[in-house]
Amino acid sequence: MRDSFPDLLHTDKNKSRQSIKQSNNSSNKLCTFTTQFILMIIPTLASCVAAGKKPTHLFWVGCAGSFDQRAQRVSSAFAHILTRVGIDFAILGQEELCTGDPVRRAGNEFLFQLMAYQNIQTLNNYGIEKIVTTCPHCFNVLKNEYPALGGNYDVIHHTTFLQELIEQGKIQFTDSNEWKGKSIAYHDSCYLGRANDIYEAPRKVLESLDMELREMKRCKSKGLCCGAGGAQMFKEEEKGDKRINTERADEAIETKASMVASACPFCNTMMTDGIKNRNEEIKMDVLDIAEIVAQAIK
C-alpha cells in the first residue's frame, strides 16, 4: 500500500514550502495540501464514497508523482490547477499501486499482471470512468494495456486536459503572465508522442501562454528518447560513448532557449541531469507544463 502524496514536500523554488499531510494509515481520510498558492483539501475516493459523493475525475498520481521530490512539485502544481478551476476530483491515496509499467518493460509479465489486476479491481469497485494523470507511462498502461485485463477507462494525459480547459475558457492567465515572450524548447515524451500520437496539446498550452517555442532538431515523431524508457530509468546504462540524456540535453541547449518543458516525470529527471552534466542548469531550467501553467493561472 502507498501514500499518493508525501507527508512533507519541499521546493527550493523561491524558498517556498509545500506540505501535504495524510492521516496515518487510513485511505478514507482527506489529504490536506498547502502551497504558496492556496490551501486545498484533496479527498480520497474512499472518503467520497463514505460521504455519498462520486468525483468526476480520478487524479492518478503515479509512483514518481508520489515519491520523487522533483515530481511531487508537478503533482502539487497540477492539483492546484484542478482545484483552482473547480474540477471535482479525488485521489486513491494508499489504495493506489504502481501500474506495473516498469516491471512489464523489464520483462516480468507475471508481476505486471498481479499489480494490474489489483489496480483494476480497486478502480472497478469504485466505478471509475475518467482518469487524468501527469505520467505518460501510467497514461499509456491505463489507456492501452489495462483494457485487455478488464480495465476500461477514459484516460487523459494532463497536457491534453489542460489544453481542453484553456480552450473552454476555464483556465485563464494573469495579465502579468511571467512566461510571455520567453523562449522554450519542448521535449516529446516517447509514451505521449510516438506511443499515443499526442504532439500538439502540450505545444498549444505553451503557445497559449505567448511563449516562443523553439523546436529541437529531433522532435515530434522523430524525437529522441530522454534515456529513461524501457525501464532504463532503474538500471545502469550499457557501455557506450555518450549517455542518451546528455545527447538529448545537447539538442535542447542548441536551441538557446531559456528553459525546457517536459510532460513526464522521467523525462524531467533525465533532461535535468543531462543539462547539469553540461553545466548549463543556471541558464536553462526544466519545468513540467503543469508547473508553468500553475504559475500563470488567474
Image (cartoon, helix red, strand yellow):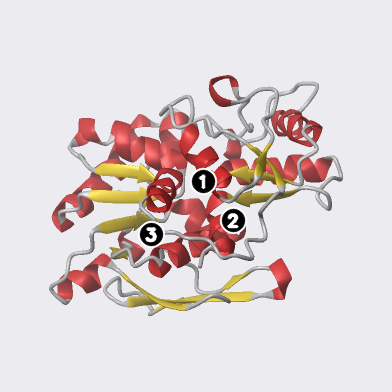
Query: In the rendered image, which residue does mark 3 sit on?
Result: 170
Q: Which mark is residue 177?
A: none
Residue type at the position of mark 3 = Lys
Q: Please identify the quarter of the rendering in which residue 71 is found.
A: bottom right
Tell me the mark number nearer the camera, choosing from 3 and 2: 3
Neighbor class of circle 1 (other Cα within 10 Å; few <14, some 14-19, many 20+) is many
Q: Nearer the viewer, residue 209 or 123?
A: 209
What x and y, as percent, mark residue 108?
Answer: 40, 31
Cα distance between the residues tagged 3 and 1: 13 Å
Q: Residue furthest right?
A: 279
Asked whether the beta carbons under mark 2 and mark 1 sit within 8 Å of each other, the answer is yes
Of the image marks 2 and 1, the number of the one nearer the N terminus: 1
The quadrant holding residue 17 is bottom right
Identify which amino acid the numbered label 1 is placed on.
Val
Image coords of residue 212 (percent x, y)? 68, 42
As drawn, 164 above or below 13:
above
Report the Cα–Cα distance between label 3 and label 2.
16 Å
Determine the residue positioned at 74% across, 23% down: 239
What's the distance in space between the residues labelled 2 and 1, CA to CA?
Answer: 10 Å
